[in-house]
Image: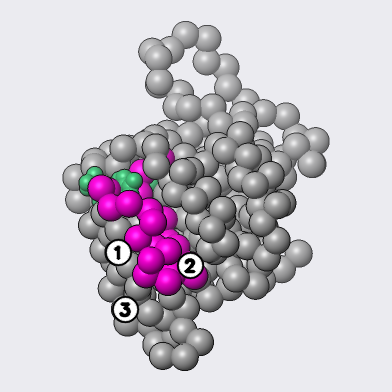
Amino acid sequence: MTNSIAVAVLGANGRMGSEAVRAVEAAEDMELVAALTRNDPLEQVLAAGATHIVDLTVPDSTEANVRFAVENGLHAVVGTTGWTDARRADLTELLAGAEGTGVLIAPNFALGSVLASAFAARAAKYFESVEIIELHHPNKVDAPSGTAVRTAELIAAERAAAGLPASPDATETSLAGARGADVDGVRVHAVRLRGLVAHQEVLLGSEGEQLTLRHDSFDRASFMPGVLLGLRQVGERPGLTYGLDGYLDLGA
Ligand SMILES: NC(=O)C1=CN([C@@H]2O[C@H](COP(=O)(O)OP(=O)(O)OC[C@H]3O[C@@H](n4cnc5c(N)ncnc54)[C@H](OP(=O)(O)O)[C@@H]3O)[C@@H](O)[C@H]2O)C=CC1
Ligand SMILES: O=C(O)C1=N[C@H](C(=O)O)C[C@H](O)C1
């Protein structure tokens, strides 16, 4: 097809990668030119003529994969977790010397999840307390989820801008882990349970009331519209975008 987006999927045998292979193959404006598994050399994407990569691998390999893409002028849509502040800063520096190349790092591709995180951030300055519970399948190798980290960052930024203190907590003694992880001052609790896919609740509390914002991905198909949206837009958005919300119109 002329003008189709030539896509290479990295991590093509994985739970997300295999779903992405199917989604790209089914998209009329895209062509799947390469599907790399763990031991395939990255040079395959160049030989196949890819213009875009989708990285759905593991935190240990994603940084090298994306660097390779940028150094070779390929746009990258990245769903893999593990993109710390330091890694993103290094990537931004690399992209500064790669004019016109775009990278989207999306902690979550599900549109409902992106909206739920944005709503939570907006609501967080109106409540005294906020905590996050993320719930996933037990094969997930990282905790807390990238989505929960991103949600906590968004919430913390809104609360800081509003001059709010940390959520109240009188805990003096506790077993290690009982109060969850501290992400920018927001407590994040991780559940791993057979039968789950990807779920998150943000609990917001004030005297006498609670608002719960919950999102559920029951199937990895839920992530595919976001992957395709990212592929269609990343070439028009040079530099690094962190979060699919950067490509959506979520209002002021
Ligand atoms: N942004 C989003 O919306 C979503 C993001 N994710 C994230 O995506 C990532 C993948 O998740 P998931 O599919 O569940 O995990 P899987 O473990 O099912 O898949 C990861 C795949 O990557 C392969 N792999 C490892 N290293 C490399 C490499 N260097 N090059 C190519 N392939 C490699 C693995 O191969 P092998 O099997 O041989 O180890 C495996 O097949 C995770 O970080 C997860 O958190 C997941 C869901 C949604
Ligand atoms: O590993 C997963 O499954 C998921 N990973 C991403 C994350 O860590 O946030 C996105 C989604 O939650 C599913």
Picture layout, residue 162 above or below residue 172: below
> What residue is disc 2 on?
52
Instruction: Report how far apart the C-alphas of labels 3 and 1 lie in the structure.
Output: 11 Å
Q: Look at label 1 and name its amino acid.
A: Ala
Give the residue type that dot 2 points to. His
Relative to 45, 19 lies left or right: left
Neighbour tally class for label 3: few under 14, some 14-19, many 20 plus, Cα within 10 Å: some
Residue at (38% x, 53% y) in the render: 42
Q: Which residue is mark 1?
A: 35
Which residue is at a point 41% across and 90% down the rendered structure image? 1
Q: Nearer the viewer, residue 108 or 38?
A: 38
Sequence-wise, which precedes: disc 2 or disc 1? 1
Q: Residue at x 57, y 62 (%)?
A: 73
Q: Name the element at disc 2.
A: strand
- Residue 41 is covered by the magenta coloring: yes
Q: Going by the image, does 95 lie left or right of 133?
A: right
Mark 3 / mark 2, whichever is N-terminal: 3
**Could you tell me which secondary element the residue under label 1 belongs to?**
strand
Element at badge 3? Answer: helix
Question: Residue 202: where, in percent of width, then height?
Answer: 50, 46
Q: Residue furthest top?
A: 173
Q: Position of residue 152 (x, y in %)?
A: 57, 41
- Front position in the image: 167 or 223: 223
- x%, y% of residue 162? 79, 41
The one of 168 and 50 positioned closer to us in this rendering: 50
* The C terminus sits in image quarter: bottom right
Looking at the rendered structure, which numbered label has been put on residue 25?
A: 3
Q: Amino acid at mark 3?
A: Glu
Q: Is residue 29 left or right of residue 71?
A: left
Question: What is the span of residues highlighted in magenta in the rendered image?
Answer: 38-59
